[in-house]
Image: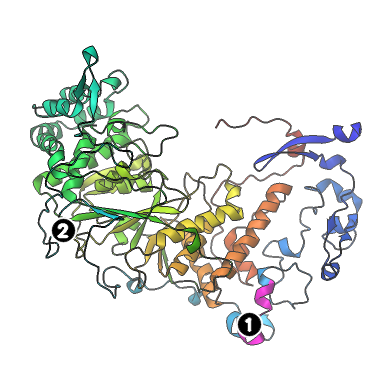
Amino acid sequence: MSKRLAQTRLHLSGSGLKFRTSPKKRPFPFKKSYSEGSAKEGRRSNMSYAQAAGGQGPSRNFSEKRNFRGRGFKPRGQHSQSFRSPAHRSPVTESPDSTESPNVINQLTNRDHEARTSSYSYYNGKSKTVEAEDYKSIDWDKLRRAPDCYVHFLPPLKYDRMHKVLFKVPPQGWSNSLVDPYPNMYRDTWEEAYVYMPCSNYNVIPSQHDQQVSRWKMIEDVLSEQITSVFELEEAVLSYNQHYTHRWDFNCLRQFFCQDLKRKDEFFTHTLPFIQKLALSLPSLVTQPLPFLKQGHESKLTISQQQAACLLANAFFCTFPKRNARMKYAILPDINFSNLYRGGPDDSMRKIEKLKCIVNYFNRIHKKMPTGIITFTRHVLHQDLVPKWDESTVKLTDLYVSSEGNIEDDGAGMLQADFANKYVGGGVLGRGLVQEEIRFAICPEMILSRLFTPVLQDHEVLIMTGCERFNDYKGYSDTFQFTGDYVDETPRDTWGRKNTEVVAMDALFFRDPETQYEKSKILREVNKAYCAFQGTEFSSYLPAVCTGNWGCGAFRGDKHLKALIQLMAASVAGRQVCYFTFDDKTLESQLRRVHGMLRKLNITVKELFKLILDYSSKVLRKRHHYWETNETLFEFIASALGESLGDTPRQAHGYNEDDFETQEFYDAEEEFTPDSP
C-alpha cells in the first residue's frame, strides 16, 4: 500500500483536484469496457494489455509502453478508428457493420437507401466529393431586411403593464416633431423598482448640524452658473459629489481639451451651456418614474430621443445618485461619466477618443434636436420555450459570409449583434474599446441602457431599437480613432424609430477555453443565441441576423464552435445569417465550405448538434487523459461527412492550445497555485 501511495501524484484536471498514478510506474491498464459483440448481450469484457496498447488491434511490443498518455490509452499515432486524424479516418461510406462506435455518423449511414442516395450523392459505393462551386454563400441581395421583409404592419404604440411609454403618443402617429412628456407634471418616487432620479425630493445630502440639503437644489445652483474652463467644470461636479473629492481625478478630461484649443473654446462657449440647460430640464422632460427592466421579466421601455439626451446630459454631469461605480456584487452598471474622466498613461488615449464621440453627439443635438423614438426591450426565454436541440428537424438556414465589411456599416435593416458584456455596455465608460464599446461610442444613446438594465442572466438579452448613429471611426481597441460626423439616413418605422435593431447578447468567459466544449456550456450559448434571434414584435418573415465572431476575443471562444452555434440558433428562429469574419479569410472560406457540405447533405439542426457533441466528447477526453489532437471542429465535421476542407489554409482553435510533447511534464506537475477569485 505504501509503495502504491508513493506512486501517486496530485494533479490538477478540469475544475478540481484528483489523485492519479504515475504513467511510468502504473500497472497494466486492464480496463473494463463494452466491446461491440458483448454490448448487444449487455455484458462487459476485459480489455487486454495488447488491446489497450493497439486500439483493440494486434499485440504490440511492450517497449511502446513508455508512450502511454494515460490509463488505457494508445501510443501516439495508434488511435482507434473513431479518433484518427482526418487523413487516416475511413470514410463514412463504410458498411454499417463497421466496428466503429455508434454516433451521429452511424445514424446518418443507417438511413434508408433512398435518403442516403439523395443526401450523400453516393455513386458506385463511394462518396461523391462536392465540387467547389457548391460551396457558395447566399447572394447579398437575397438577405431579408426590415422593413421590406415584414408582411404585417407594426401595431399602434400604446402603454401597458409590460411596456412603459414616457411620452404622449400622438393620436395620428409619429409626425417628425418633438413629443410631449407624459404626465404633464413631475411625479416623484424613491423605490427600488425605479431609477433614483437626481431631481427627486428624496435625493438629499447631510450637511452641518445634522440637517439635510436637497442635492437637486445644489445641482441647479451650480449648473445655472456659467462654466468657462475644465477646472470650473471639475469644481462644479465635485460640489454635489463631495464624497469623491479626494478620489476622483479628471486627467483624461483635461488632456482632451489640451489637445485642441479650438475645440475647447467652442465647447465652453456653445456646447456646454446647452448641456447644462438640457440637464436642468429633467423634471419637465422625464415626468414619471423610470422603471428598471427587471431580471426574469419581459419588459419594454420607450422614450423619445430628446428624453434620452436629457438623461445623458445628467450622466455627463454625474448627477445620478449611487451610480458612480459598479460594486463587486451589484447588479447595475455605472452610468455617471466620472470613470470616463479619470485616466492614467495606459488608457488615456482610449478615453479621449470616446470623449470625442460624446462631445460630437452633444454638438449634433445642439444644432438640431432629433425627434425620433427609442425602445429598449428586455427579452426573456422561458424554460418551456427552450428548443430541444437534439430533436430539432429544422434544416440549416441560408448563410452569407465575408471577411470584408462590419456589422454597423453593412448590417442595415438586419438584426445586428452586439457582442455584449452581461453588464450591457461593458467598459464603454472605462478603458474597454472593442466591439461593444465601439458600438456604444458611435451610438451614444445606447449608453443610456446602463441606467435601467440590471445584469443579464443566462436566458435574457437586451434589444435596442431606434438608436441613431452620430459618429464615424476607424481602427479597433488601441488603434480606435474618432474620424468625424456620421449622418444616419436609416428610415424610420411608424413609431418614429430608426429601423436599426441591435441585440446585446453576452457570451460566457472561459478561463479554461476547453471547458466551452462541455454540453452544459454549449447549451447555454445556443439558448442565449436563440433568445437573441427570436422575434419580439414579429414572429415570421424576420430580417437576417448580422453577426460575427461572438465571444471569440477576450472571452476565449472557439470561432468554429460559435459560428455553428449561431447558425443553429438562427435556423430554429427563422432568420438568415450574415456573418462577417472581420478580415479572417481562412475562417471565411472554411465556414462557407462547411456550411455548403451541411446544406448539400441536408443535415438538420439535431444532426449538427450531435456532431458538435461528438467533437466535444473527443476534446474533453483529450483534456482528462492527455490525448494529443490538433483537429479543429470544422476538420472533424468535414472528415465525418466524408469530405475535406480542400486547399483552404488550416486554422487552429480559437484559443491557445497547449501541445504537451513529453510525459515528464505530467510527472513533474506536483504543485500549483490556484488563481485568485
Residue placed furthest toward the top: 209
Q: Are marks 2 and 1 in contact (CB under 8 Å)?
A: no
Left or right of 551, for residue 351: left
Scheme by which the image is coloured? rainbow
Q: Which residue is mark 1?
A: 116
Which corner quadrant holds the C terminus? top right
Looking at the image, which residue is at 32% across and 61% down?
Answer: 411
- Does 108 appear in magenta? yes
Image location (x, y in percent) of residue 506: 44, 50
Q: Tell me the kind of residue under disc 1.
A: Arg
Q: Tell me the kind of residue under disc 2.
A: Val
Q: Is residue 342 above or below residue 388?
A: above
Where is residue 109, by image quadrant? bottom right
Left or right of 431, for residue 167: left
Q: Main secondary structure of the magenta part?
A: helix
Left or right of 86, for residue 599: left
Image location (x, y in percent) of residue 585: 46, 59
Q: Earlier in the sequence, mark 2 or mark 1?
A: 1
- Does 39 appear in magenta? no
Say which element carries label 1: helix
Looking at the image, which residue is at 42% across and 51% down?
Answer: 296
The segment highlighted magenta reads 106-115
Looking at the image, which residue is at 11% across and 62% down?
Answer: 175
Q: Which residue is mark 2?
A: 169
Neighbour tally class for label 2: few under 14, some 14-19, many 20 plus, Cα within 10 Å: some
Front residue of 600 and 47: 47
Q: Is residue 151 above or below residue 208?
A: below
Where is residue 258, by image quadrant? top left
Q: How many marks?
A: 2
Image location (x, y in percent) of residue 407: 34, 57
Q: Marks 2 and 1, how far apart in space? A: 58 Å
Neighbour tally class for label 1: few under 14, some 14-19, many 20 plus, Cα within 10 Å: some
